Image (cartoon, rainbow, N blue to C red):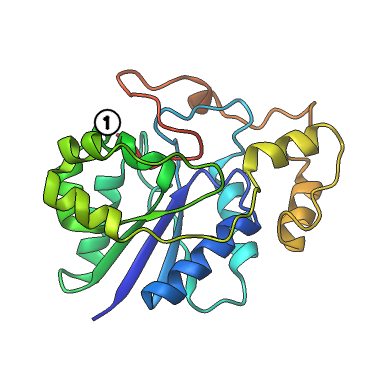
């Protein structure tokens, strides 16, 4: 039986904490593959500094080169509209079959907001939701989670919690450093740093967002910071 984990996000840009979280999950969950899936248009997370989807995918491929267990997927980039997790999981089910074990990795700070996600109860059946502890993450509200997925599934989700080494690296801080002309060395892989420099991404005078990415999506609720897998 294949064991696959999905790590999604805007990856704007991918950084070393993303890679560390994926490797920790791979080891502890004994995964065959970790799929890094950049969102085409992250629900609720519309940013004027969102680099074009193709460039975020390029950076991911550079970052994971050399790790045979890591794979970058364009599954959400090929779909129109916002990137809803349930759609992605169903597509992966068609690809890998019903016998595959699919884990969905989520930041602990987003667990309390699962009630706002599209078809959350079906999602909890179609994959194993695995929370990843992160620096400064607040404890999830057990009552809110139970209301979203049911008490039994809520207990199962919380029991899968993986504690991560505390690495206070964020994409927003990296973008701010670039805009201010500061170094991002040792925050991202060297190949990613060189790609950002060549493309002039995230500079204060750069405009990297497309028109579609500048306009908020109607009818979507705001997720917690750092999450793209919502509603």
* Rendered position, 220 above or below 122: above
Q: Left or right: 176 with respect to 49?
A: right
**Image quadrant where residue 142 sits:** top left
Foreground pick, 74 / 178? 178
Rendered view: 84 above or below 61 = above
Task: Report crowding for label 1: few under 14, some 14 to 19, many 20 or more residues within 10 A (C-alpha).
Answer: some
- Residue 41: image x %, image y %? 44, 35
Q: List x then y, in percent, for residue 109.
A: 43, 41
Expressed as whole percent of the image width and height from the top left, the position of residue 161 reads: 36, 58
Q: Is residue 204 above or below residue 83?
A: above
Instruction: Report how many numbered discs are placed on residues in the image.
Output: 1
User: In the rendered image, which residue does mark 1 sit on?
Assistant: 116
Q: Quadrant of the C terminus?
A: top left
Q: Residue at x 78, y 38 (%)?
A: 177
Seen at 18% across and 37% down, the residue is 148
What residue is shown at x 48% (from left), y 76% (from top)? 69
Identify the secondary structure beneath mark 1. helix
* Left or right of 211 on screen, residue 16: right
Q: Quadrant of the N terminus?
A: bottom left
The image position of residue 51, as x and y in percent, is 62, 38
Image quadrant assignment for residue 52:
top right
82 or 188, nearer to the observer: 188
Give me the residue at 30% from left, 51% from top: 88
């Amino acid at each position: 039986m294949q064991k696959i984990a999905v790590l999604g996000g805007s990856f704007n840009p991918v950084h070393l904490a993303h890679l560390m979280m994926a490797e920790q999950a791979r080891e502890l969950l004994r995964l065959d593959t970790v799929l890094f899936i950049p969102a085409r248009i992250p629900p609720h997370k519309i940013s004027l500094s969102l680099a074009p989807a193709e460039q975020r995918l390029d950076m991911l491929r550079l970052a994971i080169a050399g790790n045979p267990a890591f794979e970058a997927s364009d599954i959400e980039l090929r779909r129109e509209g916002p990137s809803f997790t349930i759609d992605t999981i169903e597509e992966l089910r068609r690809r890998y079959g019903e016998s595959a074990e699919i884990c969905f990795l989520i930041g602990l700070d987003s667990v309390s907001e699962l009630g706002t996600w599209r078809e959350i109860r079906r999602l909890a059946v179609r994959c194993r939701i695995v929370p990843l502890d992160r620096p400064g993450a607040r404890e999830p509200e057990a009552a809110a989670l139970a209301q979203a997925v049911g008490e039994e599934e809520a207990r199962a989700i919380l029991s899968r919690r993986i504690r991560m080494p505390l690495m206070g690296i964020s994409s927003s801080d990296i973008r701010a450093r670039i805009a201010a002309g500061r170094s991002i060395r040792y925050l991202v892989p060297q190949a990613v740093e060189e790609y950002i420099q060549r493309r002039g991404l995230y500079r204060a005078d750069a405009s990297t967002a497309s028109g579609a990415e500048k306009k908020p999506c109607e009818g979507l609720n705001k997720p917690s910071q750092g999450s793209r897998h919502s509603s």
